[in-house]
Image (cartoon, helix red, strand yellow):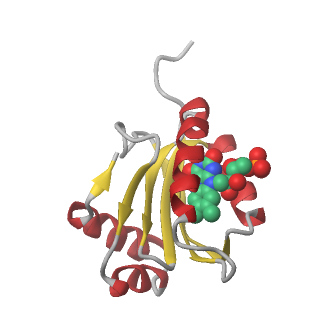
């Protein structure tokens, strides 16, 4: 048996709070997601600015793709767009089953949403130190 952690899959997507939802729904989403992510070996960070979501998720490929499927069917948000997808050998978020940060700057989320691929991921990672993350 190999001692290496199997290849990880990572995903960054952006979406928009559904018009019939209150911003407070994010509390429920995070509480529910944390227990599930721990069970599935998923780690990551969800950022919310009151309207837009950006979430970075990493973990076993099957678990990440299954979550993406659930996310696409979740009526609490709309306009889900995957802006980056790739493989990694090491986790970026060892501490967080799902870190959560509230962003006050509208431009942050819009800036990520406007980008594609590695540029979007780099932008997200660059903003990370400025987020007040509640692990
Ligand atoms: C913005 C947003 C982020 C979410 N993040 C997660 C997550 O990290 N992990 C998770 O299990 N569910 C998350 N959910 C909830 C899933 O969309 C879904 O409701 C949940 O995984 C149950 O899926 P199922 O009904 O297909 O089993 C999130 C939902 C939203 C709207």
Residue 124 appears in the rendering: yes
Residue 56, compared with residue 126, is above or below; it is: above
Residue 82, compared with residue 98, is above or below; it is: below
Identified at 46% across, 24% down, the residue is: 4
- In this rendered view, identify the residue nearer to me: 101 or 45: 101
Corner quadrant of residue 123: bottom left
In the rendered image, residue 93, in percent from the top left (x then y), is placed at 37, 44
Residue farthest along the left direction in this orientation: 130
For the C terminus, give its image quadrant: top left
- In the image, taking residue 106 as reference, residue 52 lies left or right, namely right
Corner quadrant of residue 106: bottom left
- In this rendered view, identify the residue nearer to me: 80 or 10: 80
- In the image, taking residue 135 as reference, residue 13 lies left or right, namely right
Identified at 69% across, 79% down, the residue is: 20
- In the image, taking residue 132 as reference, residue 89 lies left or right, namely right
In the rendered image, residue 105, in percent from the top left (x then y), is placed at 30, 82
Q: How many marks?
A: 0
For the N terminus, give its image quadrant: top right
Residue farthest along the right direction in this orientation: 73
- In the image, taking residue 72 as reference, residue 118 lies left or right, namely left
Residue 68 appears in the rendering: no
In the rendered image, residue 6, in percent from the top left (x then y), is placed at 54, 31
In the rendered image, residue 115, in percent from the top left (x then y), is placed at 45, 83
Identified at 78% across, 64% down, the residue is: 73
Identified at 52% across, 17% down, the residue is: 2
- In this rendered view, identify the residue nearer to me: 70 or 116: 70
């Amino acid at each position: 048996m190999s001692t290496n952690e199997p290849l990880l899959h990572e995903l960054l997507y952006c979406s928009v709070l559904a018009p019939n939802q209150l911003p407070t729904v994010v509390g429920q989403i995070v509480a529910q997601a944390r227990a599930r992510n721990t069970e599935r070996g998923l780690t990551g960070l969800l950022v919310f600015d009151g309207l837009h979501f950006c979430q970075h998720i990493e973990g076993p490929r099957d678990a990440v793709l299954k979550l993406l499927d659930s996310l696409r069917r979740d009526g609490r948000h709309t306009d889900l767009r995957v802006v980056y997808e790739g493989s990694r050998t090491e986790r970026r978020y060892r501490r967080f089953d799902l870190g959560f940060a509230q962003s006050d700057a509208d431009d942050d989320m819009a800036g990520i949403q406007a980008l594609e691929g590695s540029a979007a991921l780099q932008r997200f990672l660059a903003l990370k130190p400025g987020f007040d993350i509640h692990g």
